[in-house]
Image (cartoon, rainbow, N blue to C red):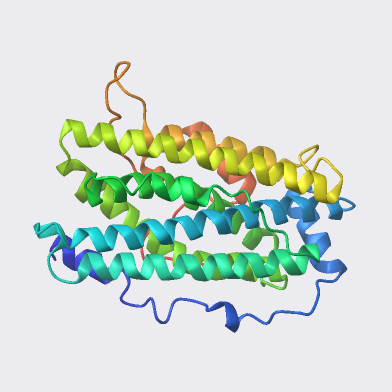
């Protein structure tokens, strides 16, 4: 099987192994059981429902903005690839993979915002989401493949973090009785394919770059992360103002999320051999996992791996 045949095969069952947002049995409102489950997920104890609502609303609304950005950039990349007649973009495989990726990201944004509105009882949006600035990073004259690699390297860390939270939800709610577990499961079906696409980019696209292209990929990635961090701060301030509390105090979910993000960045991106040098090869998070990282994810999610092998989804 060629590399492009493998890429095309990633989405062979994407029309089956997916859940459209309209397929979920959306309630008119969430009852005490859903809120208690969120308290367990985040604080590992009952009685923190309001803090859990603020935390989940902030994280999912923020994630919806990130997923919308990913979809927009992938659309730019696909349009620009038409001017690059190289073997990687020949045929239909790469266009198909990125089209599925982009479409599913918009479904996720739709799904998350709907959950947040139901959970918070309001339109919990953030007008100052820096969307134009985040998209502008990818509108220069760089190679579309450099842009794609920077985007995937950024998205992959977040995809890996939320996958650990999906595993945690399944461990606490193996029968998927709670809507939050159903939501993360539906999201995870698509993310499993997105992660495989990221791996393809890491292993088949990035190694073809010149030194200058690798450095440019790193610059775009770092600028993306800086703007995403600012978006996170704005959503955090918005959540704390809206709900009138500090949802981070005593919140193990929040603390582990920060640990996972820093750990996964280090493992996946690596560190340059010297100041100003490009990063080493981008790595799969499970391949790069160290003992400390594995203990962290296993204690939090009851799973020793982040991403299962292709086709080995749970539940």
236 over 41 or under it: above or below: above
Name which quarter of the figure residue 82 lies in: bottom left
Name which quarter of the figure residue 272 lies in: top left
Q: How many marks?
A: 0
Q: Residue furthest top?
A: 274
Q: Residue at x 43, y 62 (%)?
A: 192
Horizontal relation, residue 60 to residue 265: left or right: right
In percent of width and height, residue 211 lies at: 18, 31
Q: Is residue 184 visible?
A: yes
Q: Residue at x 33, y 69 (%)?
A: 99
In percent of width and height, residue 133 lies at: 47, 45
103 over 268 or under it: above or below: below
Horizontal relation, residue 210 to residue 146: left or right: left
Horizontal relation, residue 86 to residue 24: left or right: left
For the C terminus, the image quarter is bottom right
Q: Is residue 281 visible?
A: no
Horizontal relation, residue 128 to residue 104: left or right: right
Q: Nearer the viewer, residue 57 or 71?
A: 71
In percent of width and height, residue 154 lies at: 42, 44
Q: Residue at x 21, y 37 (%)?
A: 213
In percent of width and height, residue 165 lies at: 60, 53
For the N terminus, the image quarter is bottom left
Q: Residue at x 29, y 57 (%)?
A: 77
Q: Nearer the viewer, residue 127 or 301?
A: 127
């Amino acid at each position: 099987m060629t590399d492009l045949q493998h890429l095309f095969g990633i989405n062979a069952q994407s029309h089956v192994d997916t859940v459209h947002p309209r397929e979920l049995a959306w309630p008119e409102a969430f009852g005490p059981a859903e809120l208690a489950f969120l308290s367990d997920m985040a604080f590992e104890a009952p009685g923190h429902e309001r803090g859990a609502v603020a935390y989940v609303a902030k994280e999912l609304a923020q994630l919806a903005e990130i997923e919308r950005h990913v979809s927009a950039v992938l659309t730019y990349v696909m349009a620009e690839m038409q001017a690059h007649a190289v073997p990687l973009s020949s045929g239909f495989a790469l266009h198909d993979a990125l089209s599925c990726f982009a479409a599913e990201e918009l479904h996720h944004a739709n799904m998350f915002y709907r959950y947040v509105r139901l959970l918070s009882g309001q339109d919990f949006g953030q007008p100052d989401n820096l969307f134009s600035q985040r998209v502008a990073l990818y509108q220069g004259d760089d190679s579309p493949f450099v842009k794609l690699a920077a985007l995937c390297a950024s998205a992959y860390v977040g995809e890996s973090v939320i996958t650990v939270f999906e595993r945690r939800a399944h461990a606490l709610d193996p029968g998927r009785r709670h809507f939050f577990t159903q939501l993360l499961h539906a999201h995870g079906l698509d993310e499993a394919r997105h992660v495989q696409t990221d791996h393809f980019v890491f292993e088949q696209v990035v190694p073809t770059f010149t030194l200058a292209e690798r450095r440019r990929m790193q610059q775009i990635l770092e600028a993306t992360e800086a703007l995403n961090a600012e978006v996170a701060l704005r959503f955090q301030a918005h959540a704390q103002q809206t709900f009138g509390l500090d949802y981070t105090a005593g919140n193990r979910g929040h603390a582990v999320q920060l640990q996972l993000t820093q750990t996964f960045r280090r493992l996946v991106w690596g560190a340059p051999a010297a100041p100003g040098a490009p990063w080493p090869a981008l790595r799969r998070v499970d391949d790069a996992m160290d003992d400390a990282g594995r203990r962290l994810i296993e204690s939090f999610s009851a799973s020793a791996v982040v991403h299962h092998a292709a086709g080995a989804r749970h539940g």
